[in-house]
Image (cartoon, rainbow, N blue to C red):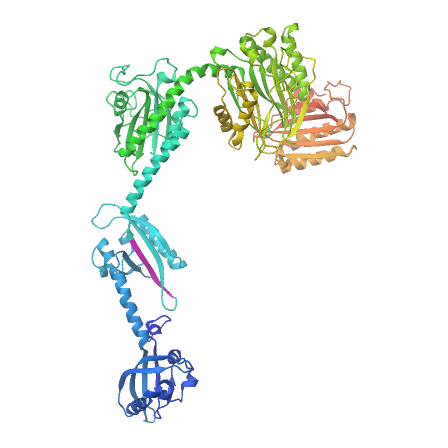
């Protein structure tokens, strides 16, 4: 069978060439390889004397003699020096094999085979070096063919996987590694062969024959090429890094433990709440330390019993063979949302095998490891269940000041590393830190319960929501020594997706202050529904406050009007009479999410704080005015345009005023505490309360914070229409197109009808240019503006009237409607709920007939 020699074969390396000599001693045939070896093309070499052409002058005599002998029929082999033609001749050494031959006419000739000795010696040297490196390498060396079978392996590789190096020829990666690792290595080999990109430090895990210990190897792979650049396989160099892996794992474990302790110090105990502190502990431990964890606290601790749950060594059980009741307050899992299916530690009561659910009250059996840990204050090992997925558990008592407050269990699932001594020490430290925080929280919670009750009774129910605002608030009532205070705040929705933000403080203390606060808060809500300007609201509220107090109590004591922000520490330090009870401060702000403008009016209250993105906190220059109940002075308004993402803070004096430092220092401290205003709003509130030296308990604290989030441009449709009849149809077209763009097809018919009514009324009864605006947020609001001052009034049309039913129709078909004055006229609006997928409510016959 004839086969072609592909590029990159052995003949390219050893440089073999041939040519023939005729009977006249001249070159008769010249091969292409001879042309490559000597650098002379065939048309230049044929017909020339090889001795005169290639041999040095001093060797030509002997060369002619040898050629003559060859033509006489003598076969010859030897080393022949040759030179390359040219000025800078390069001398080489060729091994020549000469075989006599005959031509077709019977004449003597010769065939010459030439091998470049230098290339041959270089190959021999390279092979010897390659063999030495391959065979003597202290690392496992293996060569894979293009079919990913082993072509060659060195002795070091064979020492690890058994047998001799030749025994591994033809094997695949499946003979050395388990299926997942073998598939990963095969995919890597394929990628290296296809792309030519080498791979370094490929981590592989497996076991050597006869050895059950898991080994770790680091493997480097690179593609091997022939002399012509053709890929012929992949070379792999494997190093056993098991020892290094174990050392790195130990070091990582130590670093992890230090990091966990550092994280625990930063995260545990920030809230002074029992359940939150327990969750903070598990947030640190899972998954950094364990896979599952739970916290049980004594039931008496959670119900507010005055006595501590019990001291070490003096714990008395409440039932024969059982322990005191505990409640599971926190659970965390990195692998599942539920506890294991069994309770190997005896956690369940009444002999049940299911573990306690979150929030469940339970007892540990007397002989269980958990009960032993609670009695002795020592860490106990809880063995895993053969039928479950938990490998081991540490039951760690939570001890603070020699008092056991609860138990934390850390569990690792099967497949994870078991707990070691270092882990036990870390678990004890984590539980101890949490226990101290929980004990502190227990003492605080006893005092805080009364504040929570007061907060629920005085503050608006639910979480405040507003269009274009992210709102967070805090209210901390004073302690029993300072009695009930009169701080309040409110968030009121206004037409046009606007929002009123209110913070106020009634001077004085006790039940009268709380009652006055409730009446003023109700009055503010009532006035806000009239959609008055902020200054008008405060003027009306001032009248309400003066009506609550005695007639002779309208004059404030010295100093109320003298300072820019009047200090009331002296008023609160002495017993309050009736006049002081009904003096109050208040700041009232109205925010428009479309323009991001906020209008403020202030009645003797502390200035609002604004923090714009990337800027320091600023006190807004809002004229403070006189407190409510003084009377006689008008209130001024200030309009401010706020940037997207800006933070607005309204507060009472309990946050910044104290006997220990001037008011200016407290205001500066508040500005400094808002340096991280880009954090989530709830975190900003917590940061302010924990950072400022508020001396909580001396005075009430109310804090209302809002982050500005204006309505997106695509949530607003705004058009101006000329005062002409065709504007009614144009308004319907604009409203319909906008609703279709918002995909509110279900509201098109109703909106077109109501828009037509409002625009028609503006043409008939209003003045000047007409403006139509649609706002989409939680509801759809439509506003029609004109320059007329006459407010629309809904009336019942008589049977003989041809008109007068437009506003009746608006009131019937809309969720709400109304009108308000503007600086240049009035605005009539209506509101529609967004469709929720349910069919629209059909109007009754009585409702429809009521319009006629």
Judge whether 736 appears above or below 145 on screen. Answer: above
Residue 629 locus on image (x, y percent): 64, 12
Q: Is residue 706 left or right of residue 336?
A: right
State the residue at coordinates (35%, 37%): 256
Q: Is residue 286 left or right of residue 461?
A: left
Q: Is residue 767 left or right of residue 137?
A: right
Residue 515 visible somewhere in the drawing: yes
Judge whether 415 appears above or below 116 on screen. Answer: above
State the residue at coordinates (55%, 7%): 575
Is 262 or 812 nearer to us in this picture? 262
Locate the N terminus by quadrant. bottom left
Q: Residue 811 sits in which quadrant?
A: top right
Locate the C terminus by quadrant. top right
Is 147 or 140 nearer to us in this picture? 140
Q: Is residue 385 left or right of residue 446?
A: left
Judge whether 485 appears above or below 90 on screen. Answer: above
Residue 443 locus on image (x, y percent): 40, 17
Residue 1 visible somewhere in the drawing: no
Q: Is residue 231 magenta?
A: yes
Q: Residue 847 sits in which quadrant?
A: top right
Residue 563 locus on image (x, y percent): 63, 18
Is 332 or 675 nearer to us in this picture? 675
Q: Residue 167 sits in which quadrant?
A: bottom left
Is 559 or 650 nearer to us in this picture? 559
Q: Is residue 252 magenta?
A: no
Q: Which residues are magenta?
A: 230-238
Residue 848 locus on image (x, y percent): 68, 22
Judge whether 270 appears above or below 557 on screen. Answer: below
Q: How many marks?
A: 0
- Main SS, magenta residues: strand
């Amino acid at each position: 069978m004839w086969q072609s020699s592909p590029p990159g074969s052995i003949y390219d390396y050893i440089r073999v060439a041939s040519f023939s000599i005729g009977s006249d001693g001249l070159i008769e045939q010249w091969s292409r390889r001879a042309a490559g070896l000597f650098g002379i093309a065939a048309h230049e070499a044929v017909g020339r004397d090889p001795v005169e052409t290639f041999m040095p002058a001093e060797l030509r005599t002997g060369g002619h003699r040898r050629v003559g002998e060859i033509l006489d029929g003598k076969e010859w082999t030897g080393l022949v020096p040759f030179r390359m033609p040219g000025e800078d001749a390069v001398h080489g050494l060729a091994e020549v094999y000469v075989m006599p031959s005959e031509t077709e006419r019977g004449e003597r000739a010769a065939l010459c085979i030439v091998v470049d000795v230098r290339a041959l010696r270089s190959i021999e040297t390279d092979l010897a070096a390659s063999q030495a490196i391959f065979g003597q390498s202290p690392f496992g060396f293996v060569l894979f063919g293009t079919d990913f079978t082993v072509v060659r392996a060195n002795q070091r590789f064979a020492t690890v996987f058994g047998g001799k190096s030749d025994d591994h020829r033809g094997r695949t990666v499946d003979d050395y590694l388990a299926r997942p690792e073998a598939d990963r290595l095969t995919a890597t080999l394929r990628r290296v062969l296809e792309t030519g990109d080498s791979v370094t430090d490929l981590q592989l895990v497996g076991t050597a024959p006869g050895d059950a210990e898991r080994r770790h190897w680091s493997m480097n792979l690179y593609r091997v090429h022939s002399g012509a650049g053709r890929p012929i396989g992949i070379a792999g160099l494997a190093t056993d890094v098991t020892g290094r892996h174990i050392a790195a794992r130990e070091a990582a474990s130590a670093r992890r433990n230090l990091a966990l302790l550092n994280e625990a110090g930063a995260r545990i105990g920030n809230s002074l709440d029992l359940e939150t502190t327990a969750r903070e502990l598990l947030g640190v431990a899972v998954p950094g330390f364990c896979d599952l964890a739970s916290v049980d606290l004594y039931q008496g601790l959670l119900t507010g019993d005055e006595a501590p749950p019990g001291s070490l060594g003096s714990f008395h059980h409440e039932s024969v063979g059982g322990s005191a009741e505990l409640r599971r307050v926190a659970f965390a899992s990195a692998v599942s949302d539920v506890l294991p299916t069994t309770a190997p530690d005896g956690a369940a009561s009444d002999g049940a095998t299911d573990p306690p659910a979150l929030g469940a009250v339970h007892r540990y059996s007397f002989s269980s490891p958990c009960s032993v840990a609670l009695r002795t204050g020592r860490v106990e090992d809880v063995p895993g269940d053969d039928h479950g997925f938990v490998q081991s558990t540490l039951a760690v008592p939570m001890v603070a000041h020699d008092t056991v407050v609860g138990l934390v269990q850390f569990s690792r699932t099967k497949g994870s590393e078991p707990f070691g001594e270092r882990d036990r020490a870390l678990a004890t430290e984590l539980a101890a830190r949490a226990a101290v925080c929980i004990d502190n929280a227990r003492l605080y919670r006893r005092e805080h319960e009364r504040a929570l009750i007061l907060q629920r009774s005085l503050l608006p129910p639910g979480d405040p929501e507003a269009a274009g605002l992210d709102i967070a608030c805090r209210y901390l009532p004073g302690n029993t020594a300072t009695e009930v205070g009169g701080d309040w705040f409110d968030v009121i929705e206004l037409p046009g997706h606007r929002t009123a933000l209110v913070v106020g403080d009634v001077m004085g203390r006790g039940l009268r202050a709380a009652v006055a606060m409730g009446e003023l808060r109700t009055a503010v809500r009532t006035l806000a529904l009239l959609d008055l300007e902020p200054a008008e609201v405060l003027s009306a509220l001032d009248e309400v406050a003066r009506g609550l107090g005695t007639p002779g109590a309208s004059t404030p004591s010295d100093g109320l009007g003298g300072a820019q922000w009047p200090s009331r520490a002296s008023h609160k330090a002495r017993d309050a009479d009736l006049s002081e009870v009904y003096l109050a401060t208040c700041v009232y702000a109205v925010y428009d999410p479309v323009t991001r403008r906020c209008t403020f009016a202030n009645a003797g209250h502390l200035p609002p704080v604004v923090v714009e993105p990337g800027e320091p906190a600023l006190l807004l220059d809002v004229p403070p005015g006189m407190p409510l109940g003084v009377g006689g002075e008008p209130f001024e308004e200030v309009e401010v345009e706020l940037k997207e993402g800006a933070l607005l803070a309204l507060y009472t004096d309990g946050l910044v005023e104290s006997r220990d430092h001037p008011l200016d220092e407290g205001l500066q401290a508040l500005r400094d505490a808002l340096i991280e205003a880009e954090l989530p709003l709830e975190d900003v509130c917590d940061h302010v309360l924990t950072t400022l030296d508020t001396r909580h308990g001396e005075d009430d604290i109310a804090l209302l914070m809002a982050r500005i989030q204006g309505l997106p441009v695509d949530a607003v449709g705004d058009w101006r229409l000329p005062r002409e009849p065709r504007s009614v149809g144009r308004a319907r077209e604009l409203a319909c197109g906008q609703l279709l763009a918002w995909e509110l097809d279900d509201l098109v018919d109703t909106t077109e009808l109501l828009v037509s009514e409002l625009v028609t009324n503006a043409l008939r009864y209003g003045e000047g240019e007409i403006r139509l605006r649609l706002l989409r947020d939680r509801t759809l609001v439509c506003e029609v503006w004109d320059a007329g001052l006459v407010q629309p009034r809904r009336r019942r049309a008589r049977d003989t009237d041809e008109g007068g039913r437009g506003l009746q129709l608006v009131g019937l078909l809309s969720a709400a409607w109304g009108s308000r004055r503007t600086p240049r006229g009035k605005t009539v609006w209506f509101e529609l709920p967004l469709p929720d997928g349910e069919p629209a409510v059909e109007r009754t016959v009585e409702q429809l007939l009521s319009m006629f």
